[in-house]
Image (tube, rainbow, N blue to C red):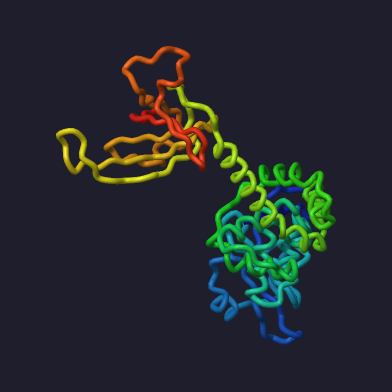
Amino acid sequence: MRVYKRVRRHRDGTHLREEKMEILALIKRINNTNTFDFFKLSNCSIDMVAYIKSFDCTRCDICGRNTMRNNVYLVNDNGKILQVGQDCLSNLTNPEMLEVINKSTSQNDLLFNEFLCRQGMYNHFDGKKVLENLFSLYSARGFIKFNSYEHFQGELYKYAKDIKPFEITTAISMLIDYLKNTNNEFLYKLYQYLTTINCLDKNSFRVLQYAFNTYNKMVESNQKSEQSQAKYCQELYKGEVFEVKSMELKSNKVITVAYRTNVETYNYIVITDTNKVLDISGTIALDPADYIGKKCICKNKVYVSKVVEGDDKNFKSYNSRTYGIVTLCNRLKLA
């Protein structure tokens, strides 16, 4: 909600007091006739159809001067609705919403321009805000190539209620670091825009919209890199506290153990924060969401009851083509 200040003055021009004045609607004369059109901002709850039926276009509640007016504004003056002429709005400290309401040609046009104004995208290009909205929109509905900045604005307006805010600061830093040594001309242009994100013109939008795809490819590449580091791990887990990086169910089957029949067992593959790979088995189903990102500890499976320090041969393990050395464990617990 935009709030504007108005300064009331004595007849001699000295300040009386400073008050806040909020624009709600504009009533505009149509082609110098006695018919009127109205444009109301989204925060206006006035029944404009009923208001215009008894509308006096010559009245201004601030200056009291009666004259034929083409534009009359309705304002909220500390809870009181006033009818104000154009000249009496001259003390607005921020005329941006006045420009929005004056330039609009239809009610839908006004609401759209008001939306842009509140998003910080009216009459200028706030690159960081635009990138944040691009990522939010793409995250909600997938990537689409926009032919123009205006096309993007319209699509954002359409989906505004469905998208969730995207924290863009980290993404910008990651992209800048990722692209700074690129030899691709297009990606280098994107890098330049990202380094000057707060002062861009509309022509940069064509390139800027591809930051989302570049970011996703970079994140996917990082994830594959992490997976490949764990893929050929050659180290045994020896009972130390670790953080669970990933955890997935390997198998779930029914077996017979000693005197017990139809015992349901669960096997999980866990990759630790140091890329050690554990094969954890037990008779209790575990929810990976309860362990991922948490500090945990396991009990190693061993060939004999006592482990001699430094004798790694006593730990049970197997070689996997996918993960390298996998340590057999049980009893996954939060540390």
Residue 300, quarter of picture: top left
Q: Quadrant of the N terminus?
A: bottom right
User: Number of marks in the image?
Assistant: 0
Q: Which residue appears farthest toward the left when viewing the image?
A: 259
**x, y percentage for residue 105?**
71, 77
Name which residue lies at 33% across and 19% down: 304
Residue drawn 44% across the image and 40% down it: 247
Res 180 seen here: yes
Along the line of sight, the residue nearer the viewer: 52 or 93? 93
Q: Position of residue 61 (x, y in %)?
A: 67, 65
In front of the other: 315 or 266: 315
| Left-right relation of 332 to 38 | left
x 65%, y 73%: residue: 39
Up-down relation of residue 57 to residue 200 (above or below): below
Is any part of residue 12 visible from this angle? no
Q: Quadrant of the C terminus?
A: top left
Left or right side of 304 for 245: right
**Which x, y percent locates residue 66?**
73, 73
Q: Is residue 157 left or right of residue 210?
A: left
Q: Nearer the viewer, residue 264 or 65?
A: 264
Residue at (75% x, 57% y) in the render: 208
Please state if 231 lies on the left or on the right of 291 as rendered.
Answer: right
Q: Quadrant of residue 130?
A: bottom right
The percent coordinates of residue 98 (x first, y second) are 73, 64
